[in-house]
Image (cartoon, rainbow, N blue to C red):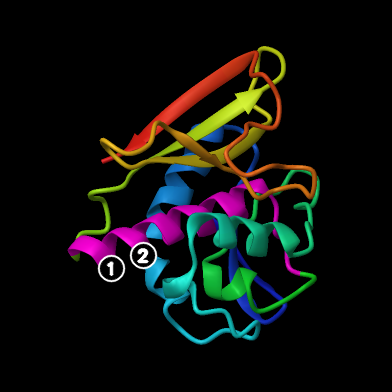
Amino acid sequence: MKQTILHGYLATEKPLTDFKQTIEEIVRLAEKYWTDLIEPNRHNVDFQKLTFKQFFDFIKSLPYVADPSGVEFISRPSICLALDDHYFDCDDRSECSLCFIFLKNYLVSKNIKHPIQARIDATGRFNKPHHVFVSYKIPSITDWVTLDPTYPKNQFGIELFPAGYRYTRFIE
């Protein structure tokens, strides 16, 4: 993997050849860096006190910045939250959302993967993936709830479009 410096931060470039690699990188970064959401940030947001809806609204309010064509950047939350002009598209927002689920789990059980269940969906309108987002489920309380703060038009708990293609990766 090629490493490059972006806005003074180390970033990893990946060719857009396999969306499953992107999903695995989202999971790897979330497992490693979920504690970024505990650290102070320039927005002065205490993520530990936010509800899922408040988290969704905050992340959705941040500027969407697409990756350059042909290059995939996925950054840990501390980088995504540090800069307004840093790449911050659906995979970065999914990684931050998964970190938030891990944080909520840790606060309840000291186990980042339980009791709230998580999954990542790669979807597309037609027969190939184009978008990625996270969903969560609180057993015996909720069914799967979409947590997709990518675009300003997105609504909490509602998928952006009916999926013609779907790949789901459950987080265990």
Which region of the structure is painted magenta? 86-109
Please state the horizontal and vertical placement of residue 130, each as a whole percent of the image.
Answer: 68, 30
Q: What is the crowding at mark 2: few (fewer than 14 residues within 10 Å), some, or many (at least 20)? A: many
Classify residue 117 as left or right of residue 12: left
Q: Nearer the viewer, residue 46 or 51?
A: 51
Residue 146 shows which numbered tag?
A: none
Please state the horizontal and vertical placement of residue 140, each as a whole percent of the image.
Answer: 26, 35
Q: Amino acid at mark 1?
A: Leu
SS at circle 2: helix
Classify residue 61 as left or right of residue 111: right
The residue that label 2 is drawn on is 103
Classify residue 116 as left or right of residue 37: left
Residue 91 lies in the magenta stretch: yes
SS at circle 1: helix
Q: Quadrant of residue 127?
A: top right
Classify residue 1 as left or right of residue 162: left
Q: Residue at x 67, y 82 (%)?
A: 8
Q: Residue at x 39, y 54 (%)?
A: 28
Q: In the figure, 16 relative to 127: above or below?
A: below
Q: Quadrant of residue 159?
A: top right
Q: What is the crowding at mark 1: few (fewer than 14 residues within 10 Å), some, or many (at least 20)? A: few
Q: If the image is split into quadrants, where does the C terminus sit? A: top left
Q: Please say if the residues under marks 1 and 2 sit with CB atoms less than 8 Å apart.
A: yes
Q: Amino acid at mark 2?
A: Leu
The residue that label 1 is drawn on is 107
